[in-house]
Amino acid sequence: MPSPPADQTFWTRPLTLKMNRLFPAPSLWDGVIANDSQPASCRYFQKNADTEITHPPQCLQNTTRRQPPPDHNECSLGWPKSCKYLAEKLVCETPQQHLFGMKPAPSIPARPRQMERKLKLSSASWQRLEKLILVPGHAVYHGKRRLQPEDDRQWVLKSYQKGEPPCYIEHVRRGVELAASRPNSLLIFSGGQTRHEAGPISEAQSYWMLADRLSWWGKVEVSQRATTEEFARDSFENLLFGIARFKECTGHFPTTIEIVGWKFKRERFGLHRQAIRWPAGNGRYYYYGVNDPPDLPVSNDGEAATRAEFEKDPFGTGEPLAWKRVLRNPFRRQFPYPLTCPEMAGLLRRTTAESAKSSGHLPQSLARARDSAAVRWPYT
């Protein structure tokens, strides 16, 4: 091998490297040729992968940099970002140009208009959805460990929730299956940022992430009709805010509400439906009790106490239910639905005391609208 120039004596041994030893995606490059002592940007891409570089000037002068993938933004070998990932073809002429004369890599190009149109069409198609499938959350899935989602260590759980994650996963799976069988439905995972230990991650968001990790159980099309409601702090707000979120997404109220959750909470959600006066007949309301927690007797005792509190305080605005909502809102979030769903503003701000002072029935005009096919349901 001819000796290198005096200013390049630090480049010594020639070496031919294969792509998969340097880059995680071999298909991105035709070949990688390198001298193991040269700077990272000289580990470059000849069209012939068997070519061996034997002299540094040959590398610097005859090697053309190829268009990089947009998601690569830094040098894997520790050199400056502009070394390897310029979004233009460039020939290195001198080491000084390589090290100091580079321009910064350009920003990622804007999203094509065609993609924008597709996204707008996808959002507009929600206006045709009529049914609400609601999956209330119970815990936060973080999935930070390389473990199965059923493992308790993948979740932020309270002491009495140990062993329950497989049940939560079954709730999510059943909701996805229902949405897949009803093309005109919107799947909403409901649950706020209730645990300080989990950080500002909502139960609803974590359920969506869980479904996505499990590839929506083979029903990926449901992901285009799935969203989150991230402010609910108890079961009453799961139902009420779920309706408001549906109205936000579609521009109208649902014709049917289908709730997926615990078997032992069926009666409690029936109380919530009565409190907001959502009709139960004509297929307007369904509750699917999927399973029960492992320690059902203890859960039944706690449920009986909570149900008794909601019987006395249907809107959950007095003690102790209101205090529970405060504790389940460590990040002090405020729901926006009175602004985004003004038709529901009165109901969203309603207290149990105000409800007791008002009449027990809706005006006939509102009752007719509530039960009509248009499903206006303007309970304010």
Image (cartoon, grey):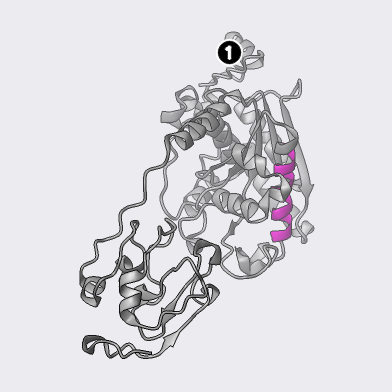
Camera-nearest residue between 13 and 239: 13
Q: Which residue is mark 1?
A: 366
- Extreme residue toward the front, this view: 2
> Compared to 112, does 341 lie above or below?
above
**Residue lying at the far top of the rendered structure:** 365
Check disc 1 and give the amino acid type.
Answer: Leu
Q: Residue at x 48, y 81 (%)?
A: 16
Identify which residue is drawn at 38% across, 70% down.
Answer: 75
Residue 359 image offset from top left, x and y in percent: 57, 18
Q: Is residue 265 visible?
A: no
Q: Nearer the viewer, residue 2 or 28?
A: 2
Q: Quadrant of residue 175?
A: top right
The one nearer the camera, 101 or 169, is 101
Residue 1: x %, y % from top left: 38, 90
| Spot occupied by residue 238 in the image (x, y as percentages of width and height) | 59, 40
- Rendered view: 95 above or below 321: below
Q: Nearer the viewer, residue 346 or 341?
A: 341
Please, is residue 373 above or below residue 266 in the view? above
Q: Quadrant of residue 378?
A: top right
Residue 182, quarter of the rendered image: top right
How far across and down, in percent of the image, does residue 333 sit? 42, 47
Q: Residue at x 46, y 31 (%)?
A: 349
Range drawn in magenta = 165-178
